[in-house]
Image: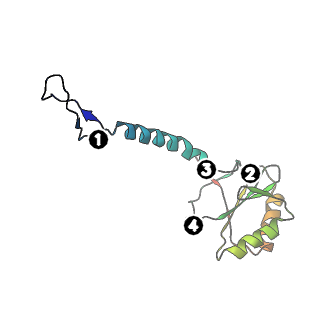
Amino acid sequence: MGMNLGPSKHKGHRVYQPMAEINVTPMVDVMLVLLIIFMVAAPMLTQGVQVALPQANAAPIEQDKPVEVTLLADGSVRVGSSPVSREALVERLKLIQADRTEASIVLRADKALSYGSVMDVMAALQAAGMVDVGLVTEAQQ
């Protein structure tokens, strides 16, 4: 709380009175710093695996957060952002399906892969009981 040094009633003596104004400048400074920190940190929170997707002229699908299966150019498979071996893929997908009532699956495959590699992963999805699979593409420009 600040003090007001107003005019004194006695010569040589000062009368201190409390100031009725709140200084909000330090609070505004702190809030601006927090705003800048969150604006810089928010884009860093998004995760993903870089894949060169093929282009297609189709409308995007609106749905809940699906399970993403990604097939990279080197042939490795990821469920979400965690790598999974092809041998353990069926068991991992069965565990995911057991936890959910509706397990929507999207397959992201690099366009440099052969058709057979993509079909191997789709066969693993079918073996896990997931037959409704969406394929992710990029919009044509």
Kindly state the secondary structure of the residue where label 4 is placed.
loop
| Quadrant of residue 57 within the rendered picture | bottom right
Up-down: is 39 above or below 92?
A: above
Give x and y (percent) for residue 53. 69, 51
Q: Quadrant of residue 107?
A: bottom right
Q: Which mark is residue 22?
A: 1
Give whichever of 119, 67 is nearer the camera. Answer: 67
Label 3's element? loop
Q: Is residue 90 left or right of residue 64?
A: right
User: Sequence order check: which comes first, mark 2 or mark 4?
Assistant: 4
Q: What residue sits right under mark 2 in the picture?
A: 111
- Specify which label sits upstream in the sequence, 1 or 4: 1
Mark closest to the chain's N terminus, 1 or 3: 1
Instruction: Give the residue drawn at x 72%, y 76%.
Output: 98
Mark 3 or mark 2: whose residue is earlier in sequence: 3
Q: Nearer the viewer, residue 83 or 140?
A: 83
On the rendered structure, is 17 left or right of 63? left
Calculate the distance from the C-alpha at mark 1 to the C-alpha at mark 2: 62 Å
Location of mark 4 (residue): 63
Amino acid type for the residue under numbered disc 1: Ile
Identity, as a three-letter code, of the amino acid under mark 4: Gln
Which is nearer the N-term, disc 1 or disc 2? 1
How far separated are the C-alphas under marks 2 and 4?
A: 24 Å
Residue holding disc 3 = 46
Percent position of residue 58, x then y: 59, 59
